[in-house]
Image (tube, rainbow, N blue to C red):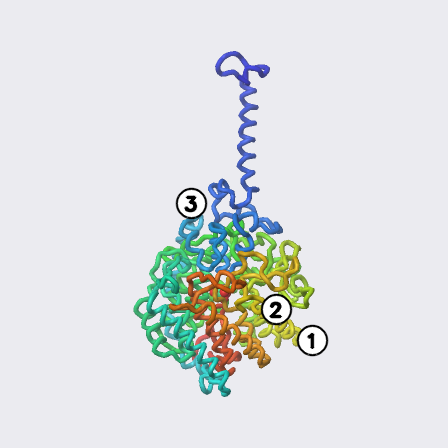
Amino acid sequence: MVFRKLPGVSASGMGLRLSQKFVFLLFLSGLVTLCFGALFFLPDSVRLKRIFLSKNENPAVTVGSDNELSKKVPGDPEHLRAGLKGGEGANVKLKVSRKPSVTHGARTVERSVGSRAQDERSPARAQEPAARDERVTSAAHNGERASAYSYEAFKKCLLKPALGKNKGTPSDSETLQRREKVKEMMKFAWDNYKRYAWGQNELRPLTRNGHIGNMFGGLRGASIVDSLDTLYIMGLMEEYEEAKEWVQNNLNLISNGEASLFEVNIRYVGGLLSAYYLTGAEIFKQKVVELGEKLLPAFNTPTGIPRGVINLGSGTSWSWGWASAGSSILAEFGTLHLEFLHLSQLSGNPLFTEKVMNIRKLLNKIEKPHGLYPNFLSPVSGNWVQHHVSIGGLGDSFYEYLIKSYLMSDKTDQEAKKMYYSAMEAIETNLVQKSPGGLTYVAEWRGGILDHKMGHLACFSGGMIGIGADDGPTEQRQHYLDLAAEITHTCHESYSRSATKLGPEAFRFDAGAEATATRLSDRYYILRPEVIESYMYMWRLTHDPKYRQWGWEAVEALEKHCRVDAGFSGIRDVYASTVSHDNMQQSFFLSETLKYLYLLFSDDDLLPLEDWVFNTEAHPLPVIRKTCLQEHGNPLV
Ligand code: DMJ
């Protein structure tokens, strides 16, 4: 009908002259191109975009879009960002994106990983052959050189015995009693896990069953691997032996599941490495090297920046569905360095070190807005994807691993040192704030705009800044120690201002708030360690008794509100005097929270900081003294 009205249109059915047909077709094809092009500008959550664009592609690496995450995810974007140090943050996000009202957050990767559409994975699959080759090479390499590492030689290079003169037993009776209490909590958490969830990843203490999830790619026994070193240093030897036996007989690494590279690295690789270094049991070394090799294909990207998710069987990797434009997360790819250096050390295979040094090189070279490191980077182009900066979830452990890389290198890694102190300078200039009530906090930064919020995760920074204080520029040392103390104080305030004396997932400093959560969705506590972690470091650095006192307050609160009949559980609202439990005993409670508490009430010679650095899951890794190791017959890698 319309055609008939147009000039030049004949009354016949075909209706158009040749030139008009050509113009019309040109117009049509232009329209189609325009529509398709428009897809690129839609936010990521738009279904069409997800159908047409694979997460592994990098359609438009845009630097500087602010707060993209909040546009992308239905539900509360705050909760999404509440992520944990690194990948775990991802988990919270995923959960919320599907169920905004759920308040316990750590185990959420599972659903979205499992439900990812096949077509999203295909580009990464194209890289499989190379990935396989790499693993073969690595395995062969390892086979040739694995036996070269001598545990005895390693021990000679420690300055002090790992467990101290007397296993860190404190001389005063009150501290000893407190330490015994923490040990009892560990035994209680362990016994219940053993009784109701043995071999599964975590305990659900209310329903008295196990939780597997798929954050670990089909690997099992996360609580066992995460607990090995805690059991050992607490002298729970029977429990340690049963854990070791499980690793020997049941830790099956032939898995075809989809795992978070970050989580497997910090919990399994970290846990096994520590267990090996503390005990010398070969089984841990054997398992950890085998597992490390399964992670290598994740680095098989155009830049060598690994993707966040990997299938441990096929080696296929891809980016988190929620991460902007198929990007990788700073706290995930920036939290591999410590473990991978040790993997090279133990296996004699330099590939592990090469992979993380390549990440370091890229991050060192890339231009940084105001000297800050944004949280999202494209593994394809190597450019930042958006300018969200945080020392909490998504960014946190990257900074932690810079200073710890320096310390773990026996203070020889000058590049890590330089990057850490420059990052600290930028953080202080741009993010560190003082509240009207005088509390020091580290805000988040979104393309130049400050979000006056601190996540529980960001509270690890008190400890981090503390351990970095001594090696900073001379005139800054006292300042860094003071800053560490102020941040730790603020985090303590976030605990003491709640009804339960436990801290919320995130607290704010705006609209009249001072270290309190203003949103319902930020009020939960999932047995996280970061505040207690900072107490432990600050105690070691200053011996100010208030840190032990604050640690004890946390023990009392955990006992009162989180201990249930069959284990420990997170709670949904730290401000409610009648608590509601989330039914999850996180593996990091055994690995970190209880370990840091135990160390807080021990003498400093239990895992002395001159010899050990803790990975971000609190697994102690020894300082690598290359010359000494070499002198004692261990090869330089
Ligand atoms: C732990 O798995 C690690 O500390 C990680 O770095 C962040 N999240 C949890 C604890 O909150």
With 168 as the anchor, is 543 left or right in this view?
Answer: right
Residue for badge 2: 490
With 385 as the anchor, is 115 left or right in this view?
Answer: left
Could you tell which of marks 2 and 3 lies nearer the N-terminus? Answer: 3
Question: At which x and y percent is residue 39?
Answer: 54, 40
The residue lying toward the viewer, choosing from 333 and 115, is: 115
Question: At which x and y percent is residue 52?
Answer: 48, 41
Q: CA distance from mark 1 to mark 2?
A: 24 Å
Could you tell which of marks 1 and 3 lies nearer the N-terminus? Answer: 3
Residue for badge 3: 119
The residue lying toward the viewer, choosing from 6 and 358, is: 6
Q: Is mark 1 within 8 Å of ligand 1?
A: no
| Circles 1 and 2 in contact, beta carbons < 8 Å | no
Question: At which x and y percent is residue 556?
Answer: 49, 74
Element under disc 2: helix
| Amino acid under disc 3 | Asp
Given this view, does label 1 or label 2 mark the residue nearer the observer?
2
Residue for badge 1: 475
Please identify the quarter of the rendering in which residue 229 is found: bottom left
